[in-house]
Amino acid sequence: MQRNVLRAGAVAGLLTALAVCAGDAAARTFPFGPRTRSVNDLGNQFVPFHAHLWDLLHGRADGGLLLNWSSGWGTSFLPDLGTYLTSPFALLVGLFPREDTDLAVYVITVLKMAAAAAAMSGLLLGQRPGPWWGAAVLGASYALCGWAVVEASYNPMWLDGLIAFPLLCLAGEWVRTGRHPVLGPVVVAVAWTANFYTAWMATLGAALVLLARGVRGRRVLLRAGWTVLLGIGLAAPVLVPVFLGSRHAYPGWTREFAPAGWGELAARVLPATYGFFTPALFLGTGALLLAAALPFHRGVPARERWTWTGLVAAVVLSVQWEPTHLVWHVFATPNGSPYRQTFVLAGLAVLAAWTAVAHGWPGWRALTGGSLVLGTIAAGAASGDLATPWSYGLFGAGLAAAVGALALLRLRARRYGLAGAVLLAGALVGQAAATTAHADRERPARLDDYPAWGADHAARAAAVARADGWPRHRTDPGRPQLTGNDPLLVGGQGAAYYSSHTPAVLTRTLAALGGGWTSNGRNLQSLDNPVTDALFAVGARWRGTEVVRNAGVPPLVTVRPPGGELRYGASPFRNQELLLGSRVYDLPADGACPVGSDVHLWAPDFTGTARLGAGAPVELRGGLPRRRAPMTPLGVQRVAGATVTLDGEGSVPPGSVGCLDRARLGAAVARLRATGAVAVHVTADGVRAELPPGTRGTAVLAAPRIAGWRCEGRPAGSYGGLVAVPVTGGRTTVSCVFRPPGLRGGVGVGVVALLALAAAGQVRRLRATKTSPPHHRAVTPPAVPAA
């Protein structure tokens, strides 16, 4: 049995990897061609976060597991780690050169899909005996479902849920049979740590499978609940900070659920279809035919036939009904791709297909009934607009191949069986590869895309590294940005940051100072402005084609006069001055700046171009609330009376033009330097500053006052949204440490869960000792003398 499980897992993984790589190669997508695969969050989040993980693994990161000094002027890292990087597969990035992070993420993606295929094939054989190669093909069909190859392939953290579902179902089998009481919670803990979001969906699906397997008795249900709760408790050191990180995050998008049309739903069952707001239900036609044939398969007991058929049908309905849709998605409609639970439906369909196989290959009556069901679905797809001639052609060819393969398998001759197996596997690989290639071509045309690491990345990274002076000053990787997380990808320390955990205080502070964003405030952009560079100790920044240095910026810790919390107003120019403590801007009513001043435009809702006099046009991309254009430098006023002209659309607020006096700014910076820290020591979880003798006032750390900062043993104060601590009594040092909210409580819950798991294991060993038969020592009888 164990040998068959290993063989099935290996073949399932190979078929999966072959189909994915063949589809990417056919589409000439990275790493097999010039077409980028880094679309949307893959290029904007996952690749940069994996690059930062590489830095952590090699001791090159600015910060540690708790605090990320690179992004957002300093932000919490543990929630991001738990959301994007706690999969065991993520550690493989450390084996690649850093410039090959894109390749590492691709390899990790393929390996995750192969692992999901192997896990499903093992589950199938663990539930009931059957042909090992059939389990391999069905396992691969699960891992190559439309959700995996179309959506999760560029959201690789979701693929941990694809692996978790069969593993959690296997843990359910152990619960049902009373085996592995320690390993079961460990499996739950690994799944929930790797990606809690899809683990929630996988856990719900595994619970449905456990019920479908005919669980009887309160004891089994209590054991199942204990296993899940204990596993979640073990994962609490990661889960609690992630949960609280989400609570402190800027709200981002909100979306109302709208069910997909039934024609579109049917079309997504076919291969080579694409739609961002419909469930990717494609499954290899062989698996679909077996699942559709189950109700007509007389060899399967009636209870099993209708239990599995009813379960699949009920889950299909659940994805279209808002109350159950919310349950699947942790009670909140996702901002994009609203059918993220589809992989559970694919897994249930594969389990239904295996139920048909394990009771003998279906006969002609069942195959005819199943073919009619699939034909009805294909006909229903015609009422939508997602199916293409290629979709129908691939579907029809796959159905013919599946029927032919199953007919050969019923002949029972070895050579026919081999031909049927090859036909089933080949049809699956062909359909999945075609679906992969189709999605590869469609994504760049519909979604934002980002290039793989190349010459531009290398040049910027090298220039930033040469200018790096952390922690004496920050080096911002600047604009134009390559991704939303350039400080993680190419190095440096800046304002840019894109995460599900972007802190609300960071977004609001940056907006008050004139910053820009996309993704409704979750994707913060670098702010190229001399005043904010001074406020946040940005001593160098990439601008256009080179690094520009800002001589003599204040240190990371400065001292301000004692007083209450600052209150920002409507004008970012005045807000910058308030935080700086000096008036440095003129705001002319006629929009004409004095000669020699730096002209800056603030038009957050404007989309188009702006120019100063006859200068070069500068692009602005506003459109509130989704996009917010940052305060933008337009150049130096060279000619008296030159004004700013705009070409585009969107509102422009009063006081949109600010004239920066560099001399006044220089004087303000000199004052901050004179009273600021004489030395700053930054660690992976905090900062210590040495102040001039006799300092009194408020020490301000140029980092957002996110939840978790404590200074001198007390929660840190806030000064204009920055970390602050009063300085009295001639103190000459200030120390602040950062602990993500929920870390202490999460560790406590984890320790209790670990002790409970150890106690449960010990009790089981004691019971096993008591119930085992006593060991009797063999006694040699005395020799009898020969007569």
Image (spheres, helix red, strand yellow):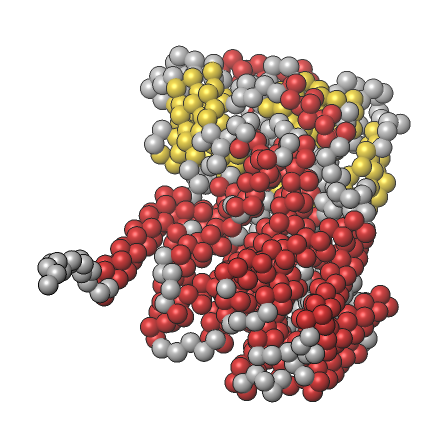
- Residue 476, percent across and down? 64, 27
Q: Is residue 607 left or right of residue 524?
A: right
The residue positioned 72% from the left and 65% from the top of the image is 422
Residue placed most toward the observer, 410 or 138: 410
- Residue 309, percent across and down? 59, 80
Q: Is residue 562 left or right of residue 549?
A: left
Q: Is residue 76 above or below residue 220?
A: above
Residue placed most toward the observer, 682 or 226: 226
- Residue 333, percent across and down? 60, 62
Q: How many marks?
A: 0
- Residue 377, percent across and down? 74, 77
Q: Residue furthest front?
A: 787
The residue positioned 10% from the left and 59% from the top of the image is 785
Residue placed most toward the observer, 645 or 780: 780
The residue positioned 78% from the left and 31% from the top of the image is 591
Q: Quadrant of the C terminus?
A: bottom left
Q: Quadrant of residue 101?
A: top right
Can residue 531 be seen here? The reply is no
Q: Is residue 242 above or below residue 288?
A: above
